[in-house]
Image (cartoon, grey):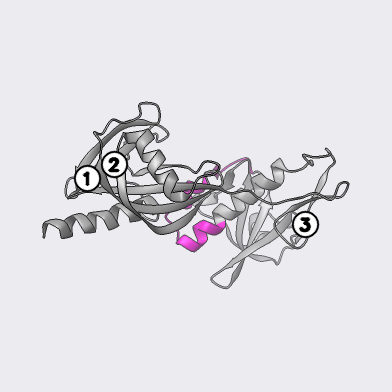
Amino acid sequence: MQREISSVDAGWWIVSSEQKLWLPQGELPHGLAADFGLAGQHGILIGEWLGENVWLIQASRPENMGSVRQVIDQDTGLFQLAGRGVQLAEFYRSHRWCGYCGHEMRISPREFACLCTHCRERYYPQIAPCIIVAIRRGDEILLANHARHRNSIYTVLAGFVEVGETLEQAVAREVMEESNVRVKNVRYVTSQPWPFPHSLMTAFMAEYEDGELQHDGKELLDAGWYRFDALPQLPPLGTVARRLIEDTVALCRASVA
């Protein structure tokens, strides 16, 4: 699967190191390897986009290394492939040595995995499942400003699934822990790979059941019920959070029609 890149290889180039992505001119490199000085590097074919190859090269560049968030407004498929590349690069970087016997490992030639030639242990990229949920109360939606956000964006609640939990149990627990609210009619909507650093977001919608809103001061800076026509600054388009909010706003509008 891994091979030396030639000057005539072409396609989309995911050049990544330490969860950073090379973005010359603020965009993913696209074209011939020779045009970007990538010939001679070792690359892995990780997918295809619009009939062209998508390559991963584990390397850093002295300039224009940024976050995969900077391409979040690209087409969903291309963003997901960029996220795959960043996650794989970090997986390969963190699995140079076997966790069982300590010997050096090699990249599998047939699948996204690392192999230990000494004890024959096989490692695959691990994905952390998360839930994200939009909660409606009549013509209002519960939105919060998360401590991890460095701006004034308000979004829906989210959290990691714990060991031994169902997704629905995780929804109920996270909502209670973060907002002191109980929900009902929890229903699955969609999912989205989320490479920050290696999550799979499972999206739900739910309805308010009871409880007085009291936000968790550690994870949330603020939280409140917002009427559908008086919303704060929202997450960018293309995110599953934005889709949940827009779907909930449509339900809120219908409830007062």
Give, as a three-letter code, the residue at label 3: Ser
Residue annotated with mark 1: 231
Upstream in the sequence, badge 1 or badge 3? 3
Upstream in the sequence, badge 2 or badge 3? 3
Residue displayed at 72% across by 54% down:
113
Residue displayed at 61% across by 53% down:
85
Which residue reaches farthest bottom? 51
Q: Quadrant of residue 55?
A: bottom right
Task: Name the side, left or right, on which 237 lies relative to 195.
Answer: left
**Residue 151 showing in the rendered view:** no
Where residue 218 appears, as percent x and y from the top left, is 40, 26
Which quadrant of the rendered structure holds the C terminus? Answer: bottom left
Measure the alpha-carbon separation of dots 2 and 3: 44 Å
Residue annotated with mark 3: 108
Give, as a three-letter code, the residue at label 1: Leu
Range of magenta residues: 61-81
- Nearer to us of marks 2 and 3 is 2
Q: Quadrant of residue 6?
A: bottom right
Measure the alpha-carbon separation of dots 1 and 3: 48 Å
Upstream in the sequence, badge 2 or badge 1? 2
Give, as a three-letter code, the residue at label 2: Leu
Q: Are marks 2 and 1 in contact (CB under 8 Å)?
A: yes
Where residue 138 appears, as percent x and y from the top left, is 18, 50
Where residue 49 appears, as percent x and y from the top left, is 55, 67
Residue 143 got which mark? 2
